Amino acid sequence: MTKDKLYVAGVDVGSTTAKAVIIDSEKNIVGKSLQNVSPRVAEDAETAFDKACKDAGIGQDQVALITGTGYGRLKVRFGSLIVTEISCHAKGSQFMFPGTRLTLDIGGQDTKAIRLGPDGEIIDFSMNDKCSAGTGRFLDVCADAL
Amino acid sequence: MAKHNPSPIDAYFESIFYMFPINSIRGTQEAVDFYKLLNLELDERIANGIGPSEEEDFRIVIEGVPPYPGYRSFWNMFRKWNAVSVAATYPKVGGMFDMKDLRHDPSRPFESIARYSIYSYCNLSWDFRRETIKNYLKDFDAEALVIHGIKSCRSFTAGQGDLRDYVINDLGYPALYVESDHQDPRYWAEAQILNRVDAFFEALKMKR
């Protein structure tokens, strides 16, 4: 990677895993990381970001904008933008699959169904509330047990 | 009052504080004096263009019983977005006296209170409640409805899921449903509620 190129990053600190992705100015994914979260969520955010930068072969100072998301988004203290994962998934699914009208996110804490309009705007969303059967963690545990 | 732009009052979070006199000392001179003073305060806010938050970015209607274990946090979730409740149903539970047949009659206080209690907001039909909320959205120039459902009062909460569908599908307004409890702190899941509230306002902003 050249030293003068600029990059953007997304750091998603969820209830069970922390993820980070680095994208270059041509919108290519050039680095990523995935790890389990610990009780030290702010440190997990930093570690995930650091690993993704290393994976991309760039310095942290080359990242022009960092967005923090997920349940631990407020702990991404080095982020320039803090956005919920619901809005991020809406943007992300439109980016990956233009024309998407419904996105399902099976997260560790909850499952979200996000209805999108023709231009990718969020029309409505709903999530499981206080039922463990709606969580990705439940599926993890069941898969292990089976 | 809240039809003004900006609204001088948060008709949910602030009004709940102002419910005490109408619930507890209804018909007394103290209650009358309190609401006269409140009116003066609101007149002054209107004259000076003062609202409950520095800016008014979102005008919303709130339906449902408040979550007292997380009341301050819940309010702050809306303040952060400069979202002001311009109409709400819960503060009317103590006195829906804007309905012409439910005026308090000080010469017959007990009969009056008893009559009102029979027709209290949460005892009214869903046809009436839907119509009330529809009118609030329109008359107060609101752009969305927020519903807070609780576990411990089924007469208020049952049917709110259908209300959300009605507001979204039949009226075309965005609506958010969040749930906790009136008193039981075990139901107050702050991160989950914040996530929904933030995502809701992000979506409203994205549409602009």
Image (cartoon, coloured by chain):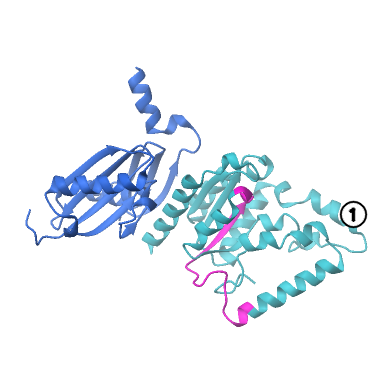
* Residue at the farthest top position: A146
Question: What is the display colour for chain B?
Answer: cyan
* Residue at the farthest left position: A2
Q: Is residue B182 visible?
A: yes
Provide the residue span drawn in magenta: B45-69
Q: Nearer the viewer, residue B73 or A91?
A: B73
Q: Nearer the viewer, residue B80 or B201?
A: B80
B8 in relation to B15, above or below: below
A79 in relation to A140, above or below: below
Magenta-drawn stretch contains A45:
no
Magenta-drawn stretch contains B56:
yes
Residue B7 placed where, x, y %? 58, 71
Q: Is residue B132 left or right of residue B207?
A: right
Question: What is the display colour for chain A?
Answer: blue
Q: Nearer the viewer, residue B117 or B36?
A: B36
Pointer 1: residues within 10 angstroms few (<14), some, or many (20+)? few
Task: Name which residue lies at 40% across and 62% down.
Answer: B205
Q: What amino acid is at disc 1?
A: Glu
